[in-house]
Image: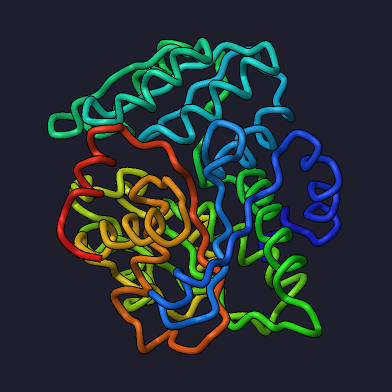
Amino acid sequence: MLEELTSEYIREVWQILPPHLKPTTFQSTFLLNKALDADVTVASETLQVTGSFKFRAAYNLLSTVPQDEVITWSSGNFGQAAAYACMLLNKSCTVVMPTTSSKAKQAAIQAYGAQIEFVDTSVKSRSERVEEVKAERPNAFYAPPYDHYRVVAGNSTLGKEIFEKLHTEDRRLDCVICPIGGGGLISGIIVARDLLAPDVEIVGAEPLLGNDAAQSLREGRLVSLPAEPQTIADGTRTLSLGNINWEIISKGVRRIIEVPEEDISGGLRTLYACANLKVEPTGALSVGAMLYQPDTFRGKRVCCVVSGGNVDPEVYAGMLQGTGF
């Protein structure tokens, strides 16, 4: 574990942060178990503050910094979380976002009072645009969406909820499946697992089109993609894991499932049909992994992490009307 992520610090965050959060939603249904041929519980962050797990990280990070101005980058969910946290903390916020990002996420960020700086990622990378904005606002605090120990610690509160709820002496949990983008969420769940339930396997779920984490795990080094992946799971359109996140993931995960686009869509439809949940494509990755590799999880007791529910209506409707489950 990283030097900053001591058990004392993590447990301190577990005491301080939850009053600012909504508890995650746990759901298990007969139809979902039948569809996936396993004992499945969904840990859904769709009803979390700003509609995704990201508020856990953003508030834990931004409530500790003295600066009144914040800069971050996001495909949408961390931007929303940072914007709302800044609104609560009386800070100004600027979010660098791709021009192709979700319109619903853009609208929410602006509604929370933040400014958006758009970037065409086919011409310039997000990191380049962030550096330009940082140069324009030298006194601002730069808030990394996943590559920071306070981000990981904030996300570990979700892991705490999962293991305290689902992994008991009477009912043991076999594994937790978690979406991977930059690695902030799965890192937090690994940290919580190591403290509370070291015998539970954590499985990553990543789009096949954006499989930098799976490549990194196979090669034993941090791999970066040459261009932003054009997966429907927009929350995972990152070039690589964060350095902190890779350090945690490389030691804490043995398996990352590379989920094809059709199974991401299938996971979204399955959650709609069998659990009455509206989720964004990234949030469907964990169930998509089960659809893609059913034999891996058949008969096991599984927690599927649904990371968020912020999705454009036309995207969601189109995926519901597609072929598949």
Q: Is residue 143 above or below residue 198?
A: above
Is residue 130 visible to us here?
Answer: no
Task: In the displayed orientation, state which residue is furthest to the front.
Answer: 30
The image shows residue 11 at horizontal and vertical percentages of: 83, 55
Task: Compare residues 9 and 255 and report the one nearer the observer.
Answer: 255
Left or right? Give the position of 179 relative to 245: left
Viewer-nearest residue: 70 or 199 = 199
241 and 263: which is toward the camera: 263
* Residue found 42% across the figure and 36% down from its top: 310
Q: On the rendered image, what quadrant is the N terminus found in?
A: bottom right
Return the x and y of residue 72 as percentages of the image width and height.
47, 27
Question: Is 13 left, or right, of 175 in this rendering?
Answer: right
30 shown above or below 49: below
- Answer left or right for 18 relative to 141: right
Q: Residue 75, image x and y in percent?
A: 35, 35
Quadrant assignment for the C terminus: bottom left
Q: Identify the residue at horizontal 70%, vertical 40% (top origin).
A: 22
What residue appears at the point 66 percent right and 54 percent down from the top-left corner?
A: 158
Residue located at (26% from left, 56% from top): 265
> How many numbered marks does the figure carry?
0
Q: In front here: 80 or 164?
A: 164
